[in-house]
Image: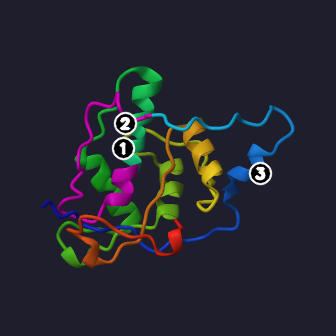
Amino acid sequence: MKIHKLGKKPAKVDARTLKLSKYLRLPAPPAPPSPPSEVSWITHVRNWPMFMNDRIGDCVPAGAAHAVEQWTQYACGQEAAITDAQVLKAYEDVGGYDPDDPSTDQGCSMLDMLKYWRKAGIGGHKILAFVSVDQKNLTEVAQAIMLFGNVYAGVQLPLSAQGADKWTVADGGI
């Protein structure tokens, strides 16, 4: 059983964050078609490195790096070569992590990471913008995945979840 470090801090909300639903309702261009029942946006990515997430709580910048790998693979035919050092730099910048001080291994806010990713980039790759997706609207989640290849999402798990074979979601919600 492999244990991974947890590192997503509680969600932050910024009222200025754009909402995908607003853009899905625009009169022109036409609304996106219904999402397919199944599609894989990961099968052509050859390498999914840990980016040290088995040793430190850098899952938030590691997730961003995985999205860069995925997007570059599907857009260019070859995934970007993101390094541990580049992910570590993002974790240091966003999460305040200092490799010489284990007490600073406290994770990151996803919103802070998105803002950093837009301004500074991960391994030289920046995003132009980001939107929030209503996680309770599964059609909107599926449309976001259909349009953008993924949804940058995280869950807040207790330490007791490490090593569990399965989890139960309370009230059937997300």
From the viewer's side, name the closer residue of 46 and 146.
146
Tag 2 and tag 1, C-beta contact below 8 Å: yes
From the viewer's side, name the closer residue of 59 and 118.
59
Query: Which of the 4 image quarters holds residue 88?
Result: bottom left
Give the residue type that dot 3 points to: Lys
Q: Is residue 78 left or right of residue 152?
A: left
Secondary structure of the residue carrying tag 2 is helix
Give the residue type that dot 2 points to: Glu
**Residue wearing tag 3:** 22
Q: How would you classify the magenta stretch by its main secondary structure?
A: loop
Residue drawn at point x = 58 percent, y = 45 percent: 142
Q: Which of pointers 2 and 3 indicates the residue nearer the eye?
A: 3
Give the residue type that dot 1 points to: His
**Residue wearing tag 1:** 66
Q: Using the rendered image of the protein, determine whether residue 143 is visible from the camera's viewpoint.
A: yes
**Residue wearing tag 2:** 69
